[in-house]
Amino acid sequence: MVWRSSFQEGAEQSSPPIPQAEASRTSVLYSFPHPLGGPGINNTAWQQINALAACDVDLTVFCTSVRVPLHRRVRVVETMTLGPRRVPHRLFGTQRTYSYHDARVAFHLRHGASSYDVVHVWPRSCLRTADQARRLGNLSFREAPNAHTAETYRASEAAGEDIGISLPRGYSHRYNKLNLRREQTEFDLVDYILAPSEYVLQSFLDEGVAEHRLIRHQYGFDPEVFYAEDSPNHHRFTAVFVGRGEPAKGLHLALQAWFESGADQVGQFLIVGKMMPAYSDYLRHQFQHPSVQVIGFSDEVAALMRSADVLLFPTVTEGSALVTYEAMACGVVPLVSDASGAPIEDGVSGFTHKVGDWEILARQIRTLAQNRPMLQDMRRAAIAQSLSLTWAASGQRLVDAYRTGIERGNIKST
């Protein structure tokens, strides 16, 4: 059954009544202050929600709008729609929209017909919700799709400074004192922070968050979209980069490694993703090399991956890059930094290197470009490991994370 709620003036309007959960099922209120469906976290949240519903969780979702099909068990309230139309965030301002969404969810918690085992919230729109959950004794879990915000700011700024590029105003990872303060308050208010990788978990520990407030889970991939061909026929060694073209993703490091490895003489490097203009200008000379093909944004990522041998992803800060999951499923061996959050077994299903160490990355590229049997062994290992990394598996691990928090109870302390 799907509930829908139109945009209304103010947060004082009551939400649709939500039936009581069955006692034997984990009852979850899931708050996402964006549309469901689309790129990035919009896709991540949608996949999480459907995976949770398939795990027989009693699930109520608040989001701004829905663009994609939802599991039949999901009850949804849309907080930014007017009739059948979506109200864009920019109409009222992004943070005002986040605050309105947060108020709607908090109002439902205060006056709704259900109590919840779990309140799952996302960044920038959860202060009132987390505070209300605390007052009611509901356990709150905050998604951490990136490293701790302070670490993300530092790493992103440093990556730009290293190559003489200033991050543009409005860029999500440019230092913003107000946003950092708000997110720190969120961290303090919730019971638990959901970390999708060891890198993310460590970044919170480094900022002084108590270990017992951090719970690991994982993201996933869609096996109907991302899958390997039975008999790949790559006549030319092919590397691929998939991501936003910005300093923090490390494309400049991947290009340095590519040319240093010598693979540019025998192979090709496909670059997929929208480019930051200043960054594109910085890389203009490398982009002109005959071994490099800049594709830009593409809706055919899966097909492009299936045409490649290795993924180059030397990011300097990340949450747990979905592109690494998708690459493994397509039979592409990830060569990634230790900040990527990639779920690989180093040296078996992929290679890792320390952030910024493009020379190690170059040696890894050279090794696989020159050793086709080793490349094929690692390809098979990546495919085999990916079988446990689907969104379905992610949903079960998220349920387990909830249960871990439920067993620990309310422990809001830093």
Image (cartoon, helix red, strand yellow):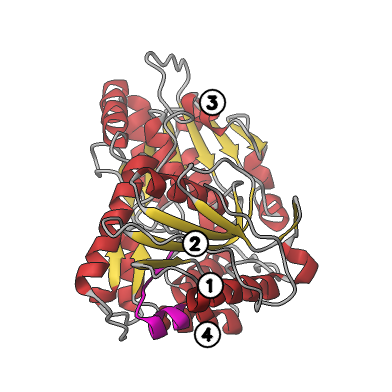
**Quarter that holds the C terminus:** bottom left
Where residue 277 appears, as percent x and y from the top left, is 72, 54
Q: Mark 1 points at which residue?
A: 108
Residue lying at 56% horizontally and 33% vertically, measured from the top left:
301
Label 3 and label 1: CA atoms lie apart by 43 Å
Task: Point out the stretch of residues depicted in magenta.
Answer: 130-144
Q: Label 3, secondary structure: give it.
A: helix
- Counting residues from the N terminus, which is met first, the one under dot 4 or under dot 2? 2
Where residue 168 appears, as percent x and y from the top left, is 69, 67
Q: Label 2, secondary structure: give it.
A: loop
Residue lying at 36% horizontally and 67% vertically, measured from the top left:
118
Q: Label 1, secondary structure: give it.
A: helix
What's the amino acid at mark 2? Ile
What's the amino acid at mark 3? Ala
Residue lying at 46% horizontally and 83% vertically, measured from the top left:
131
* Whether label 1 touches label 2, CB < 8 Å: yes
- Counting residues from the N terminus, which is met first, the one under dot 1 or under dot 2? 2
Q: Against 15, is 376 above or below? A: above
* Whether label 3 touches label 2, CB < 8 Å: no
Residue 126: tell me if it is visible.
no
Q: Mark 4 points at which residue?
A: 181
Residue 18 is marked as: 2
Label 4 and label 3: CA atoms lie apart by 42 Å
Of badges 1 and 2, nearer the viewer stands 2
Question: Label 4: how many residues lie within 10 Å, few (<14), some (14-19) or many (20+)?
Answer: few
Of badges 4 and 2, nearer the viewer stands 2
Q: Against 183, is 194 above or below? A: above
What's the amino acid at mark 4? Arg
Of badges 4 and 1, nearer the viewer stands 1
Number of marks drawn? 4
Residue lying at 74% horizontally and 60% vertically, measured from the top left:
88
Where residue 186 appears, as percent x and y from the top left, is 46, 79
